[in-house]
Image: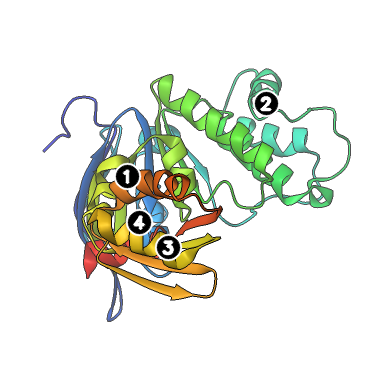
């Protein structure tokens, strides 16, 4: 059955087994234009799923299609893909111009040099850098890999932990680039384990855990699942007993623990508590030094979604 219109990547009932190990189990989804984040802890099957999407391994059961073809056997389908692997995968003795141009030549581009320079410009790397990639920083190597994946102008871009090793400025630049690529109409799948990064993508999310698709949808909807659960916050302040007592009076929290100058709050109304703490502290008044969610991390998402 062909995928619906505007779906460039179709995964239907896909499983992948390695002997007795089931790495991916009965996963189905479709990807259209725009940015989608793929979230999963180590060992969840995330990397195996990426390999399946790019035709680097065949599913045990099920069907993977990219632009209507099998990326493992269909050359046209595979040519529409760009992959940024998590591993470095660079020729360390090459200059960045040589490395990216090699990809352009493999793709059979008629003007490989011009395509190479355009791709390097998109990631803000100079084609005139004359030192080998092996001497680059981790962040520069990541950008070289992204340029190599973009050089043949793919419609589907798959990036496995592409922000690893980048400094904050480079992360902002790359996140903005991913947004631009999605807004141009490309299908961009970005693997990440950092919730803050995913929130900044403003993207649709696929959550994979224990080889299964645990959730999919808008990132805000996934985060709202957490807000419906009992969550804990640590608050450092000047008068913890007084602040804890006043917060209990609001009815927004179910318990308070005091440890020195810190409180640990438990609530089932996390959005309301986030708004109330500063207001209540100002009314006392007391100094508010820190307000940190203890469960606002990726592992918490998986606990709530699969537990």
The residue positioned farthest toward the right in the image shown: 130
Q: Which residue is mark 2?
A: 116
Residue 146 in the image: above or below residue 301:
above
Question: Percent position (x, y) of residue 177?
Answer: 55, 29
**Quarter of the image that includes the N terminus:** top left
Q: Which residue is mark 3?
A: 242
Among the two numbered marks 1 and 3 on one chain, the one whose residue lies closer to the N terminus: 1
Mark 1 → mark 3, Cα distance in angstroms: 40 Å
Which mark lies nearer to you, 3 or 4? Answer: 3
Question: Percent position (x, y) of residue 108?
Answer: 57, 28
Q: Which residue is mark 1?
A: 205
Residue 288 showing in the rendered view: yes
Question: Percent position (x, y) of residue 212?
Answer: 24, 62
Among the two numbered marks 3 and 4 on one chain, the one whose residue lies closer to the N terminus: 4
Mark 3 → mark 4, Cα distance in angstroms: 51 Å
Mark identifier at residue 49: 4
Residue 76 in the image: above or below residue 240:
above
Q: Residue at x 30, y 54 (%)?
A: 207
Among the two numbered marks 2 and 4 on one chain, the one whose residue lies closer to the N terminus: 4
Residue closer to the observer: 266 or 208: 266
**Horizontal side, residue 56 vs residue 12: left or right:** right
Q: Residue at x 22, y 70 (%)?
A: 307
Question: Percent position (x, y) of residue 190?
Answer: 44, 44
């Amino acid at each position: 059955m062909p995928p619906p219109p505007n779906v460039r990547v179709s995964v239907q009932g896909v499983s992948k087994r390695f002997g007795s190990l089931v790495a991916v189990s009965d996963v189905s989804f479709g990807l259209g234009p725009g940015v989608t984040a793929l979230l999963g802890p180590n060992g969840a099957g995330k990397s195996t799923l990426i390999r399946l999407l790019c035709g680097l391994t065949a599913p045990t059961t099920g069907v993977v299609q990219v632009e209507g073809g099998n990326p493992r056997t269909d050359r046209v389908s595979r040519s529409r893909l760009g992959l940024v692997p998590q591993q470095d995968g660079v020729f360390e003795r090459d200059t960045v111009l040589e490395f990216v141009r090699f990809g352009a030549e493999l793709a059979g581009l008629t003007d490989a040099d011009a395509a190479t320079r355009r791709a390097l410009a998109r990631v803000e790397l100079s084609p005139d850098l004359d030192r080998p990639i092996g001497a680059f920083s981790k962040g520069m190597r990541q950008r070289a890999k992204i340029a190599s994946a973009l050089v043949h102008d793919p419609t589907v871009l798959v990036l496995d932990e592409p922000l690893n090793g980048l400094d904050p400025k480079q992360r902002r630049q790359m996140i903005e680039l991913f947004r631009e690529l999605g807004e141009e109409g490309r299908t961009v799948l970005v693997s990440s384990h950092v919730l803050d990064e995913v929130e900044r993508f403003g993207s649709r999310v696929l959550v994979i855990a224990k080889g299964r698709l645990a959730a999919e949808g808008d990132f805000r909807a996934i985060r709202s699942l957490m807000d419906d659960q009992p969550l804990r916050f640590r608050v450092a302040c000047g008068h913890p007993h007084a602040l804890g007592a006043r917060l209990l009076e609001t009815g927004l929290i179910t318990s308070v623990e005091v440890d020195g100058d810190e409180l640990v709050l438990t609530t089932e109304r996390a959005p309301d508590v986030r708004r109330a703490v500063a207001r209540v502290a100002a009314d006392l008044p007391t100094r508010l030094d820190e307000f940190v969610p203890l469960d606002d991390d990726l592992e918490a998402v998986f606990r709530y979604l699969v537990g």
